[in-house]
């Protein structure tokens, strides 16, 4: 009986780790393989997660609406020759957005002859005491990748709560490696 229970648990855990990715056209000239079952975000989700005048090029979430993948155009207009300084600028921006950052990995990579900047981290935003419903800290896992081209910077972001990191981190890495921009 114990062997059967252990085998059943192992099958469930392995099935949980196996996530099928579906190649998806995010916008003209941009594709990424995203987890099967991810849906385009509803306008309410976009308004809540992206409080900006500029809507993302594409935004997807899981059925529980807690794991997200999005593609956006940065307001900063870098030139490809500014790649190194852009990397420092984006890193500084990440550290300024949150109360605490634990950087997991960072660097640059080339995918299909295009150079990307990436940061993988856990972030913490402290809650605000005295504001009802806003007291608890928000702790997330984020994998963000930038493509700096002349005249535009594309931002690819995968986010989930920190307690789901173990499940989603390998998937986030696969998604980021699947990005193709023409």
Image (cartoon, grey):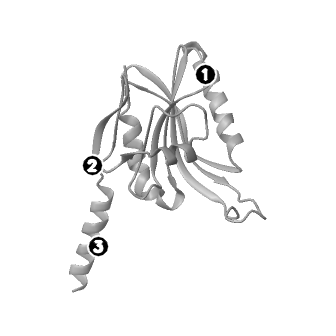
Q: Is residue 75 left or right of residue 34?
A: right
Q: Quadrant of the C terminus?
A: top left
Which residue is at a point 25% across and 80% down the rendered structure image?
A: 5
Label 2 vs 3, first from the N-terminus:
3
Q: Nearer the viewer, mark 2 or mark 3?
A: 2
Residue that badge 2 annotates: 20
The answer to which quarter of the image holds residue 21 is: top left
Q: CA distance from mark 2 to mark 3?
A: 20 Å
Using residue 68 as the reference point, say whether residue 131 is left or right of it: right
Q: Element at badge 1? A: helix
Q: Who's the residue at 37% across and 42% down the image? A: 174
Query: Label 3 belongs to which residue?
Result: 9
Q: Which mark, by number, is residue 84?
A: 1
Q: Is residue 110 above or below residue 125?
A: above
Judge from the rendering whether residue 132 lies leftward or rightward of residue 84; answer left or right: right
Viewer-closest of 179 and 3: 179
Tell me the crowding category of disc 1: few under 14, some 14 to 19, or many 20 or more residues within 10 angstroms, Cα based.
Answer: few
Q: Position of residue 161 (x, y in %)?
A: 52, 57
Residue 151 lies left or right of residue 135; in this view the side is left
Q: Quick one: 148 or 68, which is closer to the camera?
A: 68
């Amino acid at each position: 009986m114990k062997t059967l229970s252990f085998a059943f648990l192992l099958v469930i855990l392995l099935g949980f780790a196996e996530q099928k990715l579906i190649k998806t056209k995010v916008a003209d000239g941009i594709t990424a393989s995203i987890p099967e079952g991810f849906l385009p975000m509803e306008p309410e989700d976009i308004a809540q997660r992206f409080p900006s005048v500029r809507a993302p090029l594409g935004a997807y979430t899981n059925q529980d609406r807690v794991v997200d993948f999005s593609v956006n155009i940065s307001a900063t207009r870098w030139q490809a020759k500014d790649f190194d300084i852009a990397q420092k600028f984006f890193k500084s921006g990440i550290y300024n957005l949150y109360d605490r950052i634990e950087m997991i990995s960072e660097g640059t990579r080339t995918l299909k002859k295009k150079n990307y900047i990436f940061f993988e981290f856990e972030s913490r935003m402290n809650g605000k005491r005295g504001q009802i419903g806003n007291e608890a800290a928000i702790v997330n896992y984020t994998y963000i990748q930038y493509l700096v081209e002349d005249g535009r910077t594309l931002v690819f972001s995968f986010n989930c709560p920190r307690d789901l990191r173990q499940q989603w981190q390998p998937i986030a890495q696969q998604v980021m490696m699947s990005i193709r921009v023409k």
